[in-house]
Amino acid sequence: MSNSDRADLVARMMLSRECDRRSGLTLRQGNAWFAISSAGHEAFAALGDVLTAADHIFPHYRDRAIVMARGMTVEDVARDLMGKADSHSGGRSMTSHFSHRPGNVVSVASPTASQCLPAAGAAWAAKLRGDGSAVLCSLGEASSRQGEFFEALAFAVQNQLPLVFLIADNGYGISTPTHDMNPRHLGLLPAERLSVVDGSDPDAVRAAGQDAFDRARGGFGPVVLWCELDRLESHSSSDDHKLYRPKAELASLRDPISRYAARLVADGVVTQEWVDARRLEIADEVEQTFTRVASEPAADVKSVSEHVFGSSSVALPAPQVSGGTMVAAVNTALRAGLDRYPEMIVFGEDVADPKGGVFGFTKGLDRSRVINSPLAEATIVGAAVGLAAAGMRPVVELQFVDFVGPAWNQITGQLTTLRWRSLSDWTCPVVMYAPWGAYLPGGGIWHSQSNESLFTHLPGLRVVVPSTPEDTEAAFLTAFAGEDPTLILLPKHLMRRRCEPVASSGVGARIVRPGSDVTIVTWGNGVELAVEAADRLEVSPEIIDLRWLVPWDRETVAASLRRTGRLVVVQEDGRTSSFGATVIAELSGADDDFYSLLAPPRLVAKDDVHIPFHPDLERAVLPSVDDVVAAVRSVLI
């Protein structure tokens, strides 16, 4: 580095520190509610000199120096602290949950280490494109005990991804000393991929960072930069480290700014007078900026529901379904998507030929773009988040929806929140599909769940449950063209059933059978129950297949209810806190619809019990045609 570059680096470090100091004052003045200090981590500003403009950064909440090196200004930092309307999140994310689209700084989510798998996905996108870019993923040493860090490292090693993990080892996970529990000291990290660095020395950080990125870009795969440094202040403004750190330890903390400034003075790069004058200039700049931002408005509370979704998906014309089954429809749709979108890949367990997925969804598709994943659902979804953020269109298969648990952190923390928390700067058009539901004896507890209400509860996720091959194909093509994450739940009971062609508009609800006496609303396997029940009834029910649960077609249902005056909702899921209960509550809570009711609505649902293995026991807990018939007759009395 030239002398001017080194002087500029220490000034950038001082700028980050002054933002910390001013944040504390702003908090005490009542203009902020929470603050997280980056003091002690400023040497990471040197990494800004080894990254390219095309590189992506998945930062840690103490990475103020890094994100400012990538273009976040003092104004941006102040707006972030005070949750102003013009901040990167419009006041939606906690302070220090950085995001800066122009600098490829991907929005931070609070769950620790949840950024690791998306970072691996973004690195995978870089490798697939061959554009020479790399990814920096930063986290603390306490977070490195999270399983998702190890999954991301394993995936990056497996695929030789251009990914550098930056571990800030300040010795504490809030108040817990971490030396005896972090993976480096437990000997769990591959020595050839580990570089231990004095994290308080910006020259050492820069040199090690340059080497790490050179290796990662050159095909070596991931490198772990383990940086030892000191956290100079409490964990956050809600913490007091004097309560748990010894006085002697606090007195001996290394300050990277004072140490580096002293070195530059000793080397004749700058004078002490220059350091003192520059510090005063920075303090004045930061004070003026923070004061000005304090008077800016917060976001309009009416805007808080914006950016949950992008623009509405537009259904594409579905080609003729080959084979007349849902399995064939999925295969046809995936083939069309791969042809239409060069940035699309399909990722999941056993999806590549010769297996082609355990249900055969991906049989015969392009092996270069249909790729087997490890047996790790968090990796499948987390990598997809990163791929999507980097501009790819990932489609992921979850072998059974019952096994979504390991991916839940990624779905709730990353996938469904990314657009909203970044005001649509970052989007996540991931398409997930999974076999779903029971009525297929022998599945038992972990192969028979119909848990759609777990997913409809998550803002930002579109959810569809088709019941015909045509609707299945249309759902996939609609999701491919959309801008949001979409989950397609495929009823196993109906997958291989050959059906007569049924016209599909692809969006909204479908009136399966018009009628005048009672409205039956259902989806998935419930459609079959409703049709069989209608054949046994002496009245004329109108059967509505919702298809899309998020967003659900309320108008079609409400219009039917106003005609019939009676409502029965049939679902396979458990009764309590279910989507069917939501449909009834929504309609009952609206005056126009409530006063159309001639009888109390009925919900036909599974008992609140798990699905047993034996077919007799399974039938005993699942809704039956008799249950639907009884519910319809009860509202006609």
Image: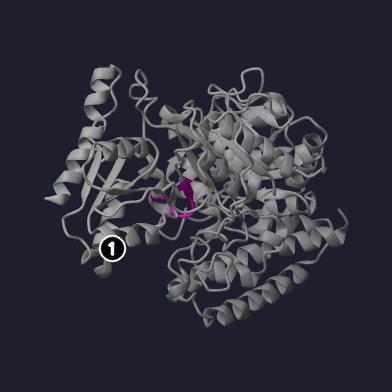
Residue that appears at 15% across and 50% down: 636
Q: Which residue is mark 1?
A: 562
133 left or right, relative to 599: right
- The colour style of the image is one colour
Label 1 is placed on what type of residue? Arg
What is the quadrant of residue 381 in the picture?
top right
Residue that appears at 49% across and 73% down: 26
* Label 1: element kind: helix
Task: Tell me where residue 92 appears, x and y as whole percent.
Answer: 48, 64
What is the quadrant of residue 311 in the picture?
bottom right
Residue that appears at 68% across and 43% down: 122
Let me know if residue 462 is in the magenta part. yes
Dominant SS of magenta comes to loop
Judge whether 139 appears above or below 15 on screen. Answer: above
What is the magenta range? 457-463
535 or 296: nearer the viewer: 535
Task: Tell me where residue 549 appears, x and y as whole percent.
Answer: 42, 49
177 left or right, relative to 572: right
**Farthest-out residue, right:** 2
